[in-house]
Amino acid sequence: MSHDAPAKPASSKLVIRNIGLLLSGELDRPILDADTVVAVDGVIQTVGKAKDIDTTGATTTIDAKDTALAPGLIDSHVHPVCGDWTPRQNQLGWIDSCLHGGVTTMVSAGEVHTPGRPKDIVGLKAMAIFAQRAFHLFRPGGVRIYAGAPVPEQGMVEDDFKELAAAGVKLLGEVGLGSVKDGTTGRRMVAWARKYGIQSTIHTGGPSIPGSSLIDKDMVLETDADVIGHVNGGHTALPDDQIVELCERSPRALEIVHNGNERAGLLALRTAKELKQLHRVILGTDSPAGSGVQPLGILRMISMLASLGEIPAQVAICLATGNTAKMRSLNCGLIAAGREASFVFLDTAQQSSGKNLLDSIQKGDLPGVGMVVTDGAVSIQRSRNTPPATRVAEVVRA
Ligand SMILES: [Zn+2]
């Protein structure tokens, strides 16, 4: 663009006003003193006080009705296959159901449930490229799904990773779900992936389903994947001393999942907290899986970890938003200028004994979702899946 070219006119301007509680997703500053957010063309432009912000020219205005605004939740660990269908439980519409649980971004840990999943190298590369492409374009309800996560198999060479990266693949599915079962091979493949900008995850713990196998702390440490996938097992957890050792000896992300061992998840959380490394803790569901699909799985993790894990509710929300975005280099998960304008509006569930939203989460209740916005546009209003929010945001001008 030349120096004096006219600025491209904004095609959309979203103004959210009367925010009662602004949950930033930022671990160091989880609550902001702000009541207004402006987003232009799906990107957050301004966060602050109404009196200081130009809210004119809005194409959509949302009155938050004094409810809380948080970044759209991120599910760090899903197993999509194709479209909004999972063969694991033969269920349609699972992604849309999760949107009603406040999730606006999902990260694939491998499209491993694909019927007839190819395990030969050409076939697995083709499937990964297809999944990356298809989910890039397919956004049910506005949910963004980062998919195309090939599970490494024996025989892959450096050129395979180079080729995958050149084709747009940015994720490696869970190391250990394929034929790579030793740390030496795992480490070599993760290093090639990293060299070409592909982020990696390792399966941690006992086998998930018949055919998979145990991955212990020695293999996790040696492989050194970017994300210690389900550090609390998926579902079978490692012994406590091994979980503590992973927290202490690895600098990588500690992913706690809904479909894991809850006691082990609390152990990982407490250990990370003692180590002053809460920024490494990220949340996923590990669904669809044998345990099913949990549309409220991320909200349930937030309430479980806040109520039983002795962390403030606003911090628990950071684990499912800003922490995951930072550990996975995603441009969402924070309410800050320049970030994707994807939000969830929350309020105390009706009849909760909590005296406000954060207190209700602290007491173990789930919040009610009143609205979800993806990329600056309203995706849903009152959730069909959460307990009803006491107050809900309203679109006052569309
Ligand atoms: Zn796994």
Image (tube, rainbow, N blue to C red):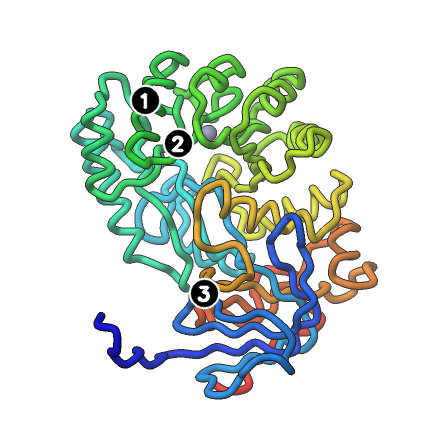
What residue is shown with label 3? Answer: 374
In this view, the residue farthest toward the left is: 122
**Which-is-in-front pick, marks 2 and 3?**
2
The secondary structure type at the circle numbered 2 is: strand
Question: Label 1 near label 3: C-beta < 8 Å?
Answer: no
What residue is shown with label 1? Answer: 189
What residue is shown with label 2? Answer: 200
- Where residue 378 appears, x then y in whole percent? 47, 72
Q: Residue at x 28, y 33 (%)?
A: 196
Q: Earlier in the sequence, mark 2 or mark 1?
A: 1
Question: Label 1 near label 2: C-beta < 8 Å?
Answer: yes
Residue nearest the viewer, comparing 322 with 144: 322
Residue type of the residue flagged with mark 3: Thr
Q: What's the distance in space between the residues labelled 2 and 3, CA to CA?
A: 26 Å
Residue nearest the viewer, comparing 201 with 239: 201
Q: Residue at x 71, y 63 (%)?
A: 349
Residue type of the residue flagged with mark 2: Ser
Residue nearest the viewer, comparing 236 with 45: 45
Q: Quadrant of residue 68?
A: bottom right
Bin the neighbour count of mark 1 within 10 Å (Cα to Cα): few under 14, some 14-19, many 20 and up: many
The secondary structure type at the circle numbered 3 is: strand
Residue type of the residue flagged with mark 1: Met
- Where residue 17 appears, x then y in whole percent? 61, 78
- Where residue 374 appears, x then y in whole percent? 45, 65
- Where residue 318 appears, x then y in whole percent? 62, 49
Q: Earlier in the sequence, mark 3 or mark 1?
A: 1
In this image, 248 relative to 224: left or right?
right
Q: What's the distance in space between the residues labelled 2 and 1, CA to CA?
A: 9 Å
In this image, 133 relative to 306: left or right?
left
The secondary structure type at the circle numbered 1 is: helix
